[in-house]
Image (cartoon, helix red, strand yellow):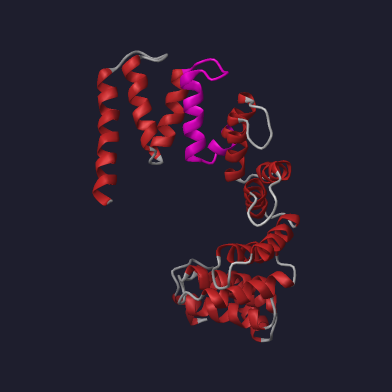
Amino acid sequence: MQLLTESDCSLNDLQISDILIQLDLARAGDEDAMLIVAKIYKELTKYDGYLFWLQSAASRGNTEAQYLLANCYIDGEFMEEDYEEAFKLYKKAAEKGHADAANNLADMYFNGEGVEVDELAALKWFTFAAEHGVPEAMFTLGIIYEQGIGIEEDEELAFEYYLQAAQIGDEEAQYRMGTIFLEGLCGKEQDIKLAVKWFEKAAKVYHVDALFNLGFIYENGIDVRRNGKLALNFYKQASLLGDLQSKINIARIYEKGIDVKKNPEKAKKWRLQAENQIMTIEGGA
């Protein structure tokens, strides 16, 4: 009770009462209540309490607690990094059907983190996670099959995994779909209209490379009507995300007057921004 009343969170009497009920249930061994209480401690930035209740639920075999606790070991934010312990927890949760834990377990096998590299085990768990709706796993399988990592190349299957991930909103997969149709990869014919469609989806969540590619397509009129103003819009969004080439291309549009009025002052401004960024990069190298 003292923890709640002294916290910075604004809680009314009813909320405090509900929390105390969950705390009593957690103390009585209710795993769901343990997770609720752990979340409350985290929101109150009381991380010792957060870890205590995660560990309590995880020790009882709760897969969500095992997954969250493994994340803590990976991040090293609330406790010391321990990839081997994270691996053990992800494995326990994955073997009981936790899809996100399976994806992270696959990552560890794939990258040799906390365990020796095992591409077949990685493939097994990425496939399990993908079959249970994890878009990151679908995208990674696309990479694996496209590049033939530990398995025979299969561009058609790679494309299907990219498409599945893209359709449920994975921005990296949406960007990849755009590049596939822009360049004619994975056995697909070049189709700029489809490339634009997928780049636009990724651009909605500010994928910097998707924004740049849209700018480039419209600046150069690649199978679309050239539109310097629209290109500027996409380049400026990408530049705000730190993209150097977008700044250079903005300067070029203003210098040449590509569907906009020539503006040497604006061109100079963007050139200077690009030069400053280059100097910063070289200075930090």
Q: Say whether residue 212 is left or right of residue 99.
A: left
Q: Residue at x 50, y 31 (%)?
A: 213
Q: x and y percent of residue 195 in the render?
A: 61, 30
Q: Is residue 94 visible?
A: yes
Q: x and y percent of residue 95 in the render?
A: 73, 72
Q: Say whether residue 234 is left or right of residue 65.
A: left
Residue 134 magenta? no
Nearest the eye: 199 or 10: 199
Q: x and y percent of residue 264 in the render?
A: 26, 18
Q: Residue 157 is drawn in which quadrant?
A: top right
- Principal secondary structure, stretch drawn in magenta: helix
Task: Examine the rendered structure and indicate whether residue 192 appears above or below residue 20.
Answer: above
Q: Residue 240 is drawn in which quadrant?
A: top left
Task: Examine the rendered structure and indicate whether residue 226 appears above or below residue 177.
Answer: above
Q: Residue at x 62, y 30 (%)?
A: 184
Q: Tell how many labels.
A: 0
Nearest the eye: 71 or 209: 209
Report the magenta residues as a range: 200-227
- Seen as rendered, the residue at the extreme front is 152
Task: Examine the rendered structure and indicate whether residue 144 appears above or below residue 75.
Answer: above
Q: Residue at x 46, y 71 (%)?
A: 76
Residue 211 magenta? yes
